[in-house]
C-alpha cells in the first residue's frame, strides 16, 4: 500500500474539505428528491444535474478518505532543526546564474501550490533538493535546460 507524505496542515485542510463535503451531501440528496418529484426524469435537467453533483461528491469523499487513510503525516516542527533538506522544510535557494532567491516549502502532492510557495515532494526541484545541505549546489533538470541552484537556508517551520 502506498503511503502519501503529508504535512499536518495539509491533513487538516483535507479533513476540513471532507467535513464540508459530508455536510453538503444531504443537501444534494434533498435536491435529487425534489427534482424527482417534478415528474419525467428523462427530460429533467435539475435531476440530472443533482445526480451528477452527487456522483462528484461521493467520488471526492472516497478520494479524500483514501488519501487520509494512507497518509504518512509528518510534523516538521518535531524534527530537530538541521541544515539538511527533508520533507516539510522551508528551503531558500539561489539561482546561480541570476542570483534570484526563491523560498519553497516541500509538501505532499495534494498540498502543492506554487504561487503560495509550496512544491510537491515529487517535483523536479524538490527531488533535486531532498537529501542535500545548506551550501550545496544542485542541478535541476527543467524543460528549458539544466538550472543550478545553491541551497541558502533550511528552516523547520
Image (cartoon, rainbow, N blue to C red):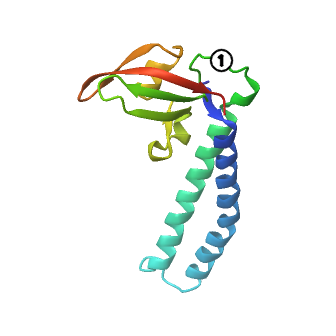
142 versus 115 height, above or below: above
Q: Is residue 109 visible?
A: yes
**Image quarter for residue 69?**
top right
The quadrant of the image that shows the C terminus is: top right
The residue lying furthest to the bottom in this view is 38
Q: Position of residue 55 (x, y in %)?
A: 54, 59
Note whether residue 75 is visible: no
Q: Residue furthest right?
A: 78
Q: How far across and down, in percent of the image, does residue 2 sit?
A: 59, 25
* Rendered view: 123 above or below 12: above
Q: Residue furthest front?
A: 99
In this view, 33 is above or below 106? below
Q: Is residue 141 left or right of residue 122?
A: left
- Secondary structure at badge 1 equals loop
Q: Position of residue 127 (x, y in %)?
A: 46, 21
- Number of marks drawn: 1
When asked about the image quadrant of residue 108, the answer is top right
- Quadrant (top left/top right/bottom left/bottom right) for the N terminus: top right
Name the foreground residue: 45 vs 91.
91
Residue drawn at (69%, 68%) of the image: 26
- Circle 1 packing at 10 Å, graded few (<14), some (14-19), many (20+), is some
Residue 96 image offset from top left, x and y in percent: 34, 22
Q: Residue at x 62, y 45 (%)?
A: 64
Relative to the observer, which residue lies in front, 83 or 53? 83
The residue located at (56%, 20%) in the rendering is 85
Residue 113 or 50: which is nearer the viewer?
113
Q: What residue do we see at 51% from left, 40% from top?
A: 112
Between residue 44 and residue 95, name the one nearer to us.
95
Per the image, the residue denoted by label 1 is 82
Amino acid at each position: 500500500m502506498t503511503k502519501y507524505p503529508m504535512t499536518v496542515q495539509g491533513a487538516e485542510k483535507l479533513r476540513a474539505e471532507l467535513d464540508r463535503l459530508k455536510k453538503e451531501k444531504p443537501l444534494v440528496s434533498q435536491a435529487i428528491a425534489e427534482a424527482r418529484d417534478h415528474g419525467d426524469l428523462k427530460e429533467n435537467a435539475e435531476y440530472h444535474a443533482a445526480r451528477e453533483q452527487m456522483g462528484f461528491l461521493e467520488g471526492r469523499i472516497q478520494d479524500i478518505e483514501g488519501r487520509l487513510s494512507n497518509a504518512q503525516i509528518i510534523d516538521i516542527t518535531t524534527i530537530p532543526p538541521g541544515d539538511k533538506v527533508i520533507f516539510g522544510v522551508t528551503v531558500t535557494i539561489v539561482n546561480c546564474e541570476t542570483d534570484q532567491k526563491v523560498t519553497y516549502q516541500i509538501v505532499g502532492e495534494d498540498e502543492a501550490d506554487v504561487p503560495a510557495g509550496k512544491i510537491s515532494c515529487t517535483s523536479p526541484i524538490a527531488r533535486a533538493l531532498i537529501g542535500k545541505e545548506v551550501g550545496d549546489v544542485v542541478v535541476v533538470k527543467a524543460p528549458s535546460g539544466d538550472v543550478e541552484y545553491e541551497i541558502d537556508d533550511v528552516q523547520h517551520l
